[in-house]
Amino acid sequence: MSLEHFLEQLEEERAWREAEIRFLDNSQRSLEKEEDRMLMRRSILCLIYAHIEGFVKFSFSLYVDEINKKNLLCYQVKPVIAAATLSREFLALSENRKSKIFRSDLSDDKHLRKLFRQAEFIENIFDVKNYEVKIPEEYINTEDNVGITVLEKLMCKVGLDHTDLRDVNAPLGRLLNVRNDISHGKRRAGIDHKDYEEFLNCCKSVISGLSRKLTLAFDRQAFLVAS
């Protein structure tokens, strides 16, 4: 995929989400009573959060999917990307599965199971560098709770600087807390204009900031190992 097509997909995803928020925002502004506007803002706030989470999931998944399409080998990419390719194998090392090598009555011993799963991994370790990079779909996980911590985790998981989005830390944290309070029935009051504007700007900041960072990373092929 070209850089232009990558950016086009991000912009298309961004456009429809922002259009929906803008439609509802204009609707609440048209209401005569401030009390009604406050209550409608409360509902819009939940949608704002949903669009942040949806865009975060989409954009990181797009970035990973495009890495997968390049048919790269593990030795060509950053260690964290290679590790992502092997994430299922690493998970198997920690699970209580029977080894393909070790089959006898003693294979019920959990310590021997672990030892021989590790042995299988070591046996194939020299081939790892030539594994084709295919990051599993489930590797990108928003944990249904996108705050700055989850954003930073995702940046780390694709080999990017996790501090790059820290400018949205405070408003995103507040937005997540208020959204959770609304969802759990702890907050029934409406949202005042000042807070609402902060959350609107937070949404724009997260989406535009993430689009910019991932587009730049894709353009620079930041997933490749430094030459």
Image: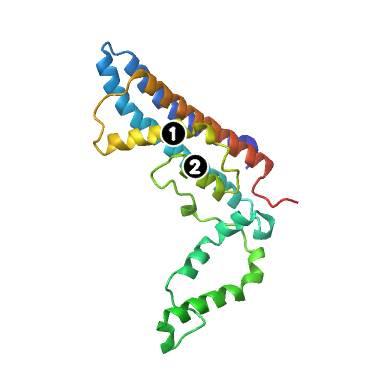
Kindly indicate whether the residue at mark 2 contacts the one at mark 1 (C-beta within 8 angstroms): yes
Packing grade of label 1 (10 A; few <14, some 14-19, many >=20) is many
Q: Nearer the viewer, residue 3 or 43?
A: 43
Q: Nearer the viewer, residue 170 or 104?
A: 170
Residue at image point 43% right, 74% down: 97
Quarter of the view holding residue 123: bottom right
Instruction: Tell me if I can see residue 206 in this picture.
Output: yes
Colouring: rainbow
Residue at image point 75% right, 51% down: 227
Is 119 positioned to the left or the right of 105 in the image? right
Q: Is 46 placed above or below 65 here? A: above
Which residue does the numbered mark 1 point to in the structure image?
172
- What is the x, y in percent for residue 209? 55, 32
- What is the x, y in percent for residue 153? 51, 47
Quarter of the view holding residue 192: top left
- Most extreme residue toward the front is 170
- What is the x, y in percent for residue 50? 38, 36
Q: Which mark is residue 190?
A: none
For mark 2, give the secondary structure: helix
Residue at image point 51% right, 75% down: 117
Which residue does the numbered mark 2 point to in the structure image?
151
- Most extreme residue toward the top is 32
Q: Is 107 placed above or below 93 here? A: below
Report how far apart the C-alphas of labels 1 and 2 lie in the structure.
10 Å
Instruction: Tell me the quadrant of the picture where the N terminus can be found.
Output: top right
